[in-house]
Image (cartoon, coloured by chain):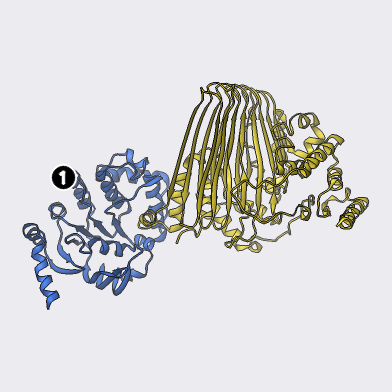
């Protein structure tokens, strides 16, 4: 065993010697994880010493931790030494026309109503110079820079804005937080960095224009968004188009920070490969997302539409530290076939008059399992805190499961907490009624399910709301009859 | 338009329809009457294509097509409409959204242009008047929290918007007070024309005072035991269903 490890290290070092850094494009680190790998990864990214140290601290912490198994999900053990922790962004094979794209993917594109140009980009077909995403991206970055907004990759931020990264990274999700967050802190490949300065309102949905780029983000993504006093930003991650990825484990960390009177709105549409109809393959999406309402009157809203991944394990939460701060969580989680989702939120009330709202809609079909798990914690000093939670489950068919695990910890008697939960089923009668009006089964389910999710979809940026409704119907295809 | 030949239908082991023959031409209104459990609703549901029924014999032709081979949605797109006896509630689905989706599906099937939002809105506004439907019900979830009368009126409103060729009204009169009954009947009469046909399934004669049928058929124990003109309905009202049951008993004994 020890000789094997030794060989790997040797190989790794060899590669490093032979100019790993200069020829980034073609290279990848050997599989496995040790301090050397982390040092190399950091070296490839030309990171400063403090970053390497931070990664190593995280790694050493991770070694002491155990993979958590309290979530209501089942999967085969993950071999962390069998994962490649760095591989340069691979160039997709260039295709000459859309005809060469997998017909199933094309069909989904068409159903989602994605434009031809965009379809080409998403599937790696050569595109016209006019629609080159890089040039579009650059134009918008310039516009944003004019008003002081920093919007770049986390690697660039580490190089160019070390003071901000040092100050905020790990301040919401420390590297000691949990097994997957520690792993991410040690090996994160890249991600997004946003800083919105005081009293600036970001004039566009960030990443709406960049979703093609966003779609290429890696396995261990790290995102850090900071809204300074009085700032506002709305960020959208993900893509409705189906994403295939050879990496099975995705462990991202997202940290949001809102200072006094600032507001951050973070929307996710997640449609990673869910595995086939028999439950083979698919992504394990183990994510740590947390926002800190540090300032008074600040607000953080999470909106998520989770339709993909074989396993989803995520609890985007808010730490409501500032007085009068507001946390919101709107979620639609769909599971079909053999998918498993254990998702929800954490609302930690620390400040006075803090408020939180949780609207969770779980939809289970096929043989899938869907769990809502949420924590509402009212701290001893959080005077007059309020929370409203609504957790609804919709079942399609009779082989799926819906579970709700609400945790309430109330340490201040002035708190007002409401929790509502419902479970319902799509009835054959409802489907027949719609079919009798000329609507196909698929569209009938779409109508019913979208009606059910209305409250969440209205929180999404407009154009994504439209796509999300279609995405839902596609995800549930073949779930009835 | 519709020709039903010797239709036999089972649910599980129980035979519900035991050889129905019925011919409906355009421009006609047919009433199907009968006591509870005679198979009236089964007949309506089978025509609309509801699952769970086993068709053990017979044929149904609709405008030259084999109706039983069409999916429920294609039957609807071909112009067959069922006004449900118990309209289901669809939480979160607005009436307008349902109708817009349905109408455009039907138009697409027929190779017609889909209506844009403005055209559609003016169409449904006009149709609400026909059945005196409160405009507020348009933006509400389909049938959710509707009164019994509102649900039935909403069915006729949908019929008005979708303009079917063959409408089957399944006990549309049940649960309606006399005023609502008149409004519903009035709506149906306004929708009646020489190119469409209507089958009214009812237990009572009173609806037929307002929607006057050309033919009345009495369904009993899975068979049409008597057919006649509108006066047959009055006769039934007077004599009750027992009068019909007698010859049926004799038939069975023979």
Q: Residue B74 appears in which quarter of the rendering? A: bottom left
For disc 1, the marked residue is B178
Q: What residue is shown at x 55% (from left), y 22% (from top)?
A: A353
* A314 left or right of B231 in image: right
Q: How many marks?
A: 1
Quarter containing the N terminus of chain B = bottom left
Q: What residue is shown at x 39% (from left), y 49% (from top)?
A: B98
Mark 1, Cα crowd under 10 Å, few <14 / some 14-19 / many 20+, is few
> Between B248 and A302, which is closer to the camera in this rendering?
B248
Q: What residue is shown at x 64% (from left), y 55% (from top)?
A: A75
Observer able to see residue A26: yes
- Give the vertical position of A258 relative to A450 (above or below): above
Residue A78 in the image: x percent, y percent?
A: 71, 54
Which chain wears yellow?
A
Q: What residue is shown at x 72% (from left), y 29% (from top)?
A: A146
Residue A259 in the image: x percent, y percent?
A: 66, 25
* B188 left or right of A7 in image: left
State which chain disc 1 sits on.
B
- Give the vertical position of A397 relative to B124 (above or below): below
Label 1, secondary structure: give it.
Answer: helix
Residue A77 in the image: x percent, y percent?
A: 69, 55
Residue B52 in the image: x percent, y percent?
A: 35, 64
Quarter containing the C terminus of chain B = bottom left
Which chain wears blue?
B
């Amino acid at each position: 065993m020890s000789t094997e490890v030794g060989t790997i290290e040797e190989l790794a070092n060899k590669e490093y010697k032979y100019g790993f850094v200069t020829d980034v494009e073609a290279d990848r680190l050997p599989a496995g994880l040790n301090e050397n790998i982390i040092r190399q990864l950091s070296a490839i990214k030309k990171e400063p010493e403090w970053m390497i140290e931070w990664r190593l601290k995280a790694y050493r912490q991770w070694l002491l931790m155990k993979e958590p198994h309290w979530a209501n999900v089942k999967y085969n053990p993950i071999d962390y030494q069998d994962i490649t922790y760095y591989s340069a962004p691979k160039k997709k094979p260039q295709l000459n026309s859309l005809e060469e794209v997998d017909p199933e993917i094309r069909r989904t594109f068409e159903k989602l109503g994605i434009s031809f140009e965009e379809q080409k980009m998403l599937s790696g077909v050569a595109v016209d110079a006019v629609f080159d995403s890089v040039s579009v991206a650059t134009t918008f970055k310039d516009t944003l820079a004019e008003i002081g907004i920093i919007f770049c990759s986390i690697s660039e931020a580490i190089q160019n804005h070390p003071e901000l990264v040092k100050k905020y990274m790990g301040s919401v999700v420390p590297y000691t937080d949990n097994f997957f967050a520690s792993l991410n802190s040690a090996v994160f490949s890249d991600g997004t960095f946003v800083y919105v300065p005081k009293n600036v309102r970001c004039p566009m949905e960030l990443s709406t224009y960049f979703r093609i780029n966003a779609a290429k983000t890696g396995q261990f993504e790290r995102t850090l968004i900071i809204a300074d006093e009085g700032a506002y930003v709305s960020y959208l991650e993900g893509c409705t188009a189906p994403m295939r990825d050879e990496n099975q484990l995705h462990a991202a960390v997202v940290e949001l920070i809102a200072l006094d009177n600032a507001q951050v709105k973070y929307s996710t549409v997640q449609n990673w490969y869910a595995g086939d109809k028999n439950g083979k393959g698919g992504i394990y999406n183990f994510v740590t997302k947390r926002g800190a309402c540090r300032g008074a009157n600040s607000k953080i809203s999470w909106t998520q539409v989770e339709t993909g991944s074989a396993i989803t394990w995520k609890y985007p939460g808010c730490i409501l530290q500032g007085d009068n701060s507001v946390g919101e969580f709107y979620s639609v989680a769909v599971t079909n076939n053999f998918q498993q989702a254990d998702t929800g939120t954490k609302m930690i009330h620390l400040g006075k008059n803090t408020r939180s709202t949780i609207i969770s809609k779980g939809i289970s079909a096929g043989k899938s399992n869907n769990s809502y798990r949420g924590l509402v914690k009212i701290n001893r000093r959080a005077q007059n805190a309020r929370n409203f939670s609504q957790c609804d489950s919709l079942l399609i068919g009779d082989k799926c499961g819906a579970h709700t695990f609400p945790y309430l910890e109330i340490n201040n008697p002035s708190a007002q907490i409401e929790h509502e939960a419902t479970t319902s089923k799509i009835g054959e009668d409802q489907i027949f009624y719609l079919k009798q009006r000329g609507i196909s089964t698929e569209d009938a389910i779409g109508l019913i399910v979208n009606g059910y999710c209305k409250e969440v979809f209205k929180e999404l940026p407009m154009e994504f709301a439209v796509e999300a409704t279609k995405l839902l119907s596609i995800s549930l295809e073949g779930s009835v009859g | 338009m519709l020709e039903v030949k010797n239709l036999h239908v089972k649910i599980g082991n129980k035979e519900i329809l035991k050889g129905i023959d019925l011919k409906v031409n355009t421009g006609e209104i047919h009433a199907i009457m009968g006591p509870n459990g005679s198979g009236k609703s089964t007949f309506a549901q089978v025509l609309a294509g509801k699952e769970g029924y086993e068709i053990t014999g017979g044929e149904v032709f609709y405008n030259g097509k084999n109706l039983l081979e069409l999916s429920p949605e294609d039957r609807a797109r071909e112009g067959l409409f069922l006004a449900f006896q118990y309209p289901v509630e669809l939480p979160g689905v607005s009436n307008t959204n349902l109708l817009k989706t349905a109408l455009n599906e039907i138009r697409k099937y027929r190779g017609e242009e889909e209506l844009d939002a403005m055209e559609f809105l003016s169409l449904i506004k006009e149709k609400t008047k026909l059945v005196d439907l409160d405009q507020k019900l348009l933006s509400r979830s389909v049938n959710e929290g509707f009164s019994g009368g509102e649900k039935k009126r909403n069915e006729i409103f949908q019929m008005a918007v979708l303009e079917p060729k063959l409408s089957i009204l399944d006990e549309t009169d049940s649960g309606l007070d006399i005023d609502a009954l008149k409004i519903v009947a009035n709506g149906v009469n306004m929708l009646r024309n020489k190119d469409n046909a209507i089958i009214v399934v009812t237990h009572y004669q009173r609806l037929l005072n307002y929607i006057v049928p050309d033919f009345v058929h009495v369904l009993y124990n899975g068979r049409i035991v008597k057919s006649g003109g509108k006066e047959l309905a009055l006769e039934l009202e007077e004599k009750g269903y027992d009068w019909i049951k007698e010859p049926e008993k004799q038939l069975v004994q023979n």
